Image (tube, coloured by chain):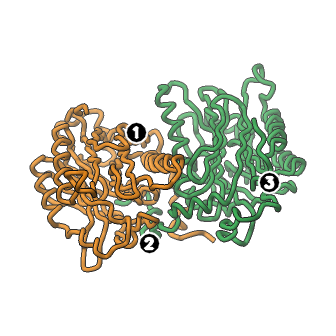
Chain colours: A green, B orange
Amino acid sequence: MPSIPKTSPATIGLIQHACPIDASASPNASPEKTRNHAIDMMRDAANQGATTIITQELFHLPYFCRREDDSLFDLAETIPGPTTDALCTTAKKLNVEISASLFEKRATGVYHNTTVFINPTGKIVGTYRKMHIPDDPSFYEKFYFTPGDPPTPPHVSPGVPDNHSGTDRAGWQNFNSSTSALKFGPLICWDQWFPEAARLTAMRGADVLLYPTAIGYLDGEPADEQQRQRDAWITMQRSHAIANGIYVAACNRVGREGELQFWGSSFIADPGGTIIAQASQTDEQILLAPIDPARIEATRRMWPFLRDRRIDAYSDLTKRLID
Amino acid sequence: MPSIPKTSPATIGLIQHACPIDASASPNASPEKTRNHAIDMMRDAANQGATTIITQELFHLPYFCRREDDSLFDLAETIPGPTTDALCTTAKKLNVEISASLFEKRATGVYHNTTVFINPTGKIVGTYRKMHIPDDPSFYEKFYFTPGDPPTPPHVSPGVPDNHSGTDRAGWQNFNSSTSALKFGPLICWDQWFPEAARLTAMRGADVLLYPTAIGYLDGEPADEQQRQRDAWITMQRSHAIANGIYVAACNRVGREGELQFWGSSFIADPGGTIIAQASQTDEQILLAPIDPARIEATRRMWPFLRDRRIDAYSDLTKRLID
């Protein structure tokens, strides 16, 4: 894995790994062990130049939504809690930001699929609770997750080095002169199929859409249908980059869990929708890519879709169907 | 070109051709000659099994928006007018539907980029006026086109053969038992970059999104950027198929007009986003594909995105940005 120089405005690092469920086959087969393994990978990512580290969805847990079981609510943690404590310590130690996806116990009987954003001082500076909740065989998420509220303001990153300035930065300063920070727009997995979620988050000023994900092949589906699904997953998220002139980072897990073979393939797309980094379908991997706000400005000047939205004609989008 | 049997529920035929501007180089270099050439292609498409024929954008005119020139408003026609008269005659003669994209003179000083939908009796049964209007070098459309109103109800096609019924049709009947007709959702070119337009049209019950288009490579742009643009154009429209579980048909012109080399590549994607037919980048071509409403039902049952839209959280989509 080549190291990316720190001279780029920011470098995100995706942490793609397995969440083993068979202790006889893996030394990481418990939530705590998987968490420690992920933290080891975060250290490696920081050493390779990552300034913002992104986890996969429910990063240290087996994908427990494969069945509906009351007892599995015990896997949830409060925020703050043991896992965010460990991640806050890690962020401070490595001097990085961390965006981590967790199973949150918010209140008695109220659980969410939640992203926390931690800054380099080790402080939680934002949360996002998954808005769109799937439910289909082997993905029984409506049983576990209360739907989240509308997108929060993007998490502001202080990760842009102070020494980055000059002509290639001018456009960005014009676009949002109040801050030189990057803004990360948190979304989660099933949200990725909804252009509305991407648009709202871009409209709030995000530079990068983050999609921690747990998606894979379901045993028994034909191979060509499996490949179609993976291709659609990539196509859909690339379309959010294109439609909004924005970076997109999707981080998915790998490995087999029961009837599911998670397909990895974590990737980062630039504001033109071009994939600038992509991980393996099967292997654990740290995936790095630079984020340059000047490219957002340049892309949106060339294809100014945000200029031409017909906001006078969009009110029916709040309906189910138009009869 | 293989003929597709009429036993499929409907077969759409895209008419991809050039609009020559140099009379010394082409026998079709006038709007009337190009129109007659397109009508010849429509006859061939019907002979090959097409039940609904789709033109490219401003199908018989040079892409006049390459410059701003008052005199070019003379190219516009009323609806009905000579071109729709010719197309209505053609539709009746061939016993097909025609969706045709025209430069419409609606009133003194009010011009639109308009699709008309003509049924097999030769009657105009619907119009759609382009909602999202681009404007960038060599594509000065804001000078010519008044923005259209929000999407109209889809044009209902009687094109589903009466003899098509049985088990593979049951799902569709459940989805919309009031009609057995296909519904075509008209959109035009720049609309294709706006997920809002696709969504609204799908919400109105369309089975197929139609995108007549005039898009090409601009001289002087690097080759890799040209290919990125074409790839983004395909990706974006495939994403509308995926997000809405709907067919998408995009019909683009070919040929050089001044500094523009139109890239053809007309295609039809199925409700899973898979391209089921695609035309050349350079040659005139009739592109046929079957449309089966049962596939929409099956796709939406598997990936029920329309079930999970968070309409309680989408009201900000009618804003420019969220500050």
Left or right of residue B42, residue A193 in this image: right
Which three-letter amino acid code belongs to the residue tagged 2? Answer: Asp
Residue farthest along the top direction in this orientation: A24
Q: Label 1 is found on which chain of the structure?
A: B
Q: Is residue B307 visible?
A: no
Number of marks drawn: 3
Of residues B150 and A174, the one drawn nearer to the viewer in this rendering? A174
The quadrant the C terminus of chain A occupies is bottom left
- Tag 1 and tag 3, C-beta contact below 8 Å: no
Q: Is residue A114 visible?
A: yes
Q: Residue at x 70, y 46 (%)?
A: A289
Give how far apart the Cα atoms at labels 2 and 3 are. 38 Å
Q: Which residue is mark 3?
A: A118
Q: Label 2 is found on which chain of the structure?
A: A
Of residues A206 and B173, the one drawn nearer to the viewer in this rendering? A206
The quadrant the N terminus of chain A occupies is top right
Q: Position of residue A40 (x, y in %)?
A: 84, 37
Which numbered disc flags the more N-terminal residue, 2 or 3?
A: 3
Which three-letter amino acid code belongs to the residue tagged 1? Answer: Ile
Label of residue B275 in the image: 1
Q: Which residue is mark 2?
A: A312
- The image quarter in which residue A282 lies: top right
Which three-letter amino acid code belongs to the residue tagged 3? Answer: Ile
- Compared with A156, A104 (above or below) is above
- Disc 1 vs disc 2: which is toward the camera? 1
Give how far apart the Cα atoms at labels 1 and 3 are. 42 Å
Label of residue A96 in the image: none
- Disc 1 vs disc 3: which is toward the camera? 1
Q: Tell me if mark 1 has few (under 14), some (14-19) or many (20+) residues whose alpha carbon lies within 10 angstroms of its own.
A: some
Both labels 1 and 3 in a single chain? no
